[in-house]
Image (spheres, rainbow, N blue to C red):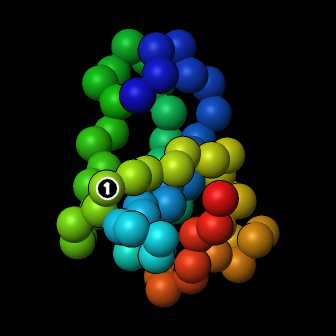
Amino acid sequence: WMKEMKFNLDAVFVNGQKVVDLAENIPFPQNNKEPQTFLSKVDFDKVLEVNSGTVKRLNIKIGDEVRE
């Protein structure tokens, strides 16, 4: 969670070099409310937070390989 963030996010959960779960259109906190908690359904060792809509726009799917 980034304080004062004003845009929705997508989250790409990665384990090793594979996408293992996705969370799309996570809303930013509004009106001094606590930010929404989001978790992966499976184990992961990295999470990439990107602008909302990126997962759909880039057609990111579970099982995709992540390269450096």
Note whether 58 is above or below 53 in the view shown: below
55 to the left or right of 46: right
Disc 1 crowd rating (10 Å Cα; few below 14, some 14-19, many 20+) is: few
Note whether 60 is above or below 54 in the view shown: below
Note whether 63 is above or below 7 in the view shown: below
- At a point 36% along the width and 67% down the height, the residue shown is 15
Report whether residue 22 is seen: no
Residue furthest right as drawn: 57
Residue 29 percent coordinates (x, y): 44, 27
Q: In the rendered structure, which amino acid carries the disc numbered 1? A: Asp
Report whether residue 43 is seen: yes
Residue 24 percent coordinates (x, y): 52, 61
Residue 51 percent coordinates (x, y): 67, 46
Residue furthest bottom as drawn: 63
- At a point 33% along the width and 39% down the height, the residue shown is 36
3 to the left or right of 7: left
- At a point 46% along the width and 14% down the height, the residue shown is 3
Residue nearest the observer in this picture, 56 or 48 = 48
| Residue that mark 1 sits on | 45
